[in-house]
Amino acid sequence: MSTVGLNFGSATSGQGFDVTSTVNQIVTNLQAVETPWKTQLTILQSKDTALSNLGTQLSTLATDLQNLTDFEGVLANKTGSSSDTNVLELSSANSTASDGTHAITVEKLAQTSSAASDAVGGSDVLTGSVTFRVGNGQWQTVHVGDSKTAATLSGLSAAVNAAGVGVHASVLTDADGTERLSLVSQTPGSAGEITIANNSNHSDSPTTLADSTAPDKNTGIGLSTIQDGVDAVFTVDGVPLTSPSNTVTNAIPGVTFQLLSAPESGSSPEVVQVIIANDTSSIESAINTFVSDYNATMKAITAQEAKDSSGNPQPLYGTSVLAQLQQGLLSAVSSSFGSSAVNSLISLGITASASDDGSITLDTNSLESALNNHFDDVVSFFQDSASFGSTFTRTLDALGNNSAACGAIALALSEDSSQETTLNDDVSNQEALIATQKTNLTSELNQANQILQSIPEQLQEVNEMYSAITGYGNNQNG
């Protein structure tokens, strides 16, 4: 601790001293006790940053592994192809699909029922109502010009849509400016057939549309079904099937495909081969990502064993947690499980690299061979209860920043946090003490400074009193 000096010149000069500067020097000396605390805080904060970064990398690695261990993850993905995408196109194959080849023929495409009115002028005022039903449903009646819509074709269209009666209405405009009401069933296939009411099929409330502005030649505006609802007809592996939609979702479990064309009348349907297979490309990509992220983690751990460019050790240099991370990961990737064709990472073409940083390398040819020839063993390796996947997952939990699993990084961060709290409390308490001392010192030194500055005036008063008593110091005449 340095010495604080007061510089105020001669005691009788009245010069005094700089109170603020003096107090600041004393405060600086008092704060010197905080230096080792703050230094230790800086060290701990650097460790926290390094630990958090490693924790993030372990979390990324855990996410990579979960994609492989999840029953609905990448190992469950399927891919598919169609031998003629002009006839049938494969949309998707999910985890419930089984790999294999299916022969599909398309005999008839599905159609959605629709109806349309005669043409009328866009601004013509209409009267009457439309009555129809969808499939075997109830008859529905919508009146022209209800309380919310105009008595025009567009108003009728809006009223039909607002009624929610199982069809979608719109107004189609021709080149000559005339308009037609279009009704499209919201139920595909034969079950969505639109039937327009007339005196024969529903005499209680037939469709009675009329144009009061420019009546057509008939007594009413015609509204009729122009496209029947038709189910798609096709076969899968010789089994005849139907579908209300050309998007078929339930013919082959887990597979969705789109019917695109059917043969012309009198022609035989083409046999389309649909192949469902394991999505090995996505699996290879997922394993490659796992290897890449594992190597990044190991290199980050190894980097903490070195020193920086100035020769200072890295924040985690020599710590037990660093050794724990390294040993845990190396042990996990080198273990074997069972006696099947795929019982270790080596079986997948993953081996230790030539470098000494703990990284691994992936031989894609060996991985492809394992996926093509021993796919079920690969799945078991990652997803069985006592497999590599479950074991490595537990290892990552035990090493990472998962506080619930008492991970090594989580415990180290917690320990650092406890020390940081104590050190911060010490600094805060010392600062509070210094603040009180600073206030007291400022007051006391201000008083002392006032005394020093008043000495010349007091000496002058003494001289004057002395002169008055003794006569010395007075001017003598004569």
Image (cartoon, rainbow, N blue to C red):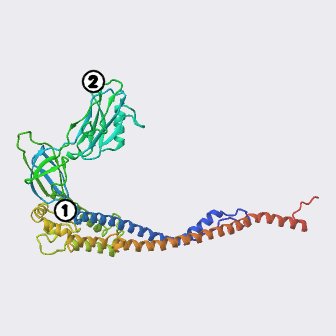
Tag 2: residue type? Answer: Lys
As drawn, is 162 to the left or to the right of 360? right
Amino acid at the residue labelled 1: Leu
Secondary element type, mark 2: loop
Q: Depth check: 319 or 221 in front?
A: 221
Q: Is residue 399 above or below residue 247?
A: below
* Furthest residue in direction right, as rendered: 478
Q: Which mark is residue 75?
A: 1
| Above or below: residue 158 compared with residue 324 | above
Say which of 121 and 57 sits in front. 121
The answer to whether residue 422 is left or right of residue 166 is right
Q: Earlier in the sequence, mark 1 or mark 2?
A: 1
Q: Nearer the viewer, residue 283 or 352?
A: 283
Taking 117 as reference, is 416 above or below it? Answer: below
Badge number at residue 407: none
Image coords of residue 446 (percent x, y): 69, 65
Q: Residue at x 27, y 40 (%)?
A: 202
Q: Position of residue 94 (x, y in %)?
A: 20, 57
Residue 306 is at least partly visible in this image: yes
Q: Quadrant of the N terminus?
A: bottom right
Please tell me in which quadrant of the rendered image residue 24 appears. bottom right
Number of callouts = 2
* Mark 1 neighbour density, 10 Å: few (under 14) some (14–19) many (20 or more): many
Q: Secondary structure at mark 1?
A: helix
* In this view, the mark in front (1 or 2): 2
Compared across the picture, whether 443 is left or right of 172 comes to right
In the picture of the structure, the residue carrying the numbered disc 2 is 217
Quadrant where the C terminus is found in the figure: bottom right
